[in-house]
Image: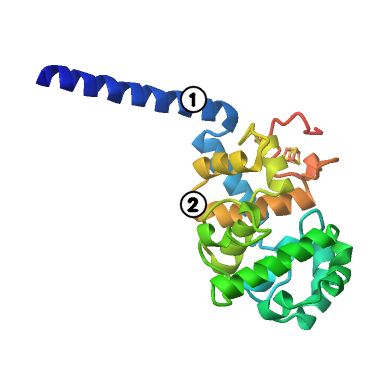
Amino acid sequence: MKAAGRASKLTSAKAKKAARSRASVQRGAQRGAGTNPARVAAILAKLDEAYPAASCELTHGNAFQLLISTILSAQCTDVRVNQVTATLFPKYPTAEAFANANPAELEQQIRPTGFFRNKTKSIMGASKGILEKFAGQVPRTMEEILTLPGVARKTANVVLGTAYGIASGVVVDTHVQRLSQRLDLTRNEDPKKIEQDLIAIIPQERWILFSHQLIWHGRRVCMARKPRCMECNLKKLCYSKDKTI
Ligand code: SF4
């Protein structure tokens, strides 16, 4: 009986290992062929060379303001958000002020950023959540921050990474998504899966800076429509079908 039990345990362990291996192969197939450690390290070195001090371009004075700016930045440029928050933050200096705002007034104030009705709901909901559940402080964990209305992983990663220096994931916005695909670091389309692919190949201590660097590169060189490949210091490493040289 003992021998039979041991054999059964071994079979079950083997089955689990095989299942893990199959899942890993499947993930790898989606992850992109360009993810070998030497190539990833070369990409990181080139990004460091081009953008050693890349940082968040949303103007903010604290974690709460960054949270509001990031909510406003959905489908909007950082430049436009910064124009709006230049007058918004003096008028609503605290979470209390936003939580008790007149929704119609707030909608008009943030209207230039687009989707202003939904954004007003998210801003007021998040402000109330911060006051009621977190004593007025933006929480410092992914689990907690995701409980706030209107806050998904992208916003959470921006706030935790930039305001608190906590690397709990990689920000996957439209630039990070496009560049990760062009650089063949992922073949996924879903931002959550792309983030998991990047987490698997980028060292954790690089997650925060790497997001900023890809966003900067996407804004300045590797644009969506006409990437400036001639000026790109990654061109030797890039074999994207969108490459223009
Ligand atoms: S070579 Fe062109 S497509 Fe490739 S990363 Fe550079 S700018 Fe983007």
Q: Against 29, is 142 above or below? A: below
Q: Which residue is drawn at 66% across and 60% down?
A: 149
Tell me, for residue 222, which label it has, or none: none
Q: Can residue 236 be seen in this view?
A: no
Q: Is 27 rendered above or below residue 131?
A: above
Badge 1 vs badge 2, beta-carbon distance below 8 Å: no
Q: Name the residue under label 2.
A: 204
Identify the residue at the far left of this view: 2
Q: In this view, does 54 lie above or below 16?
A: below
Q: Nearer the viewer, residue 102 or 87?
A: 102
Asked which secondary structure carries label 2, the reply is: helix
Q: Tell me the quarter of the picture where residue 9 sits.
A: top left
Name the quadrant where ligand 1 sits.
Answer: top right
Q: Position of residue 73 (x, y in %)?
A: 76, 60
Residue nearest the viewer, comparing 79 with 16: 16
Q: How far apart are marks 1 and 2 (CA)?
A: 22 Å
Q: Is residue 110 left or right of residue 48?
A: right
* Residue 244 percent across, percent down from the top left: 81, 33
Specify the amino acid type for callout 1: Val
Q: Can residue 192 be seen in this view?
A: yes
Q: For the point 70% across and 44% down, which residue is it?
A: 233
What mark, if any, has residue 25 been given in the picture? 1
Q: Which amino acid, by three-letter code, is at mark 2? A: Gln
Classify 11 as above or below 55.
above
Quarter of the image containing the N terminus? top left
Mark 1 C-beta to ligand 1 under 8 Å: no
Q: Which of marks 1 and 2 is nearer the N terminus?
A: 1
Say which of 204 and 17 sits in front: 17
For discs 1 and 2, the disc positioned in front in the rendered view? 1
Q: Position of residue 186 (x, y in %)?
A: 62, 35
Residue 71 location (% of width, % of height): 72, 61
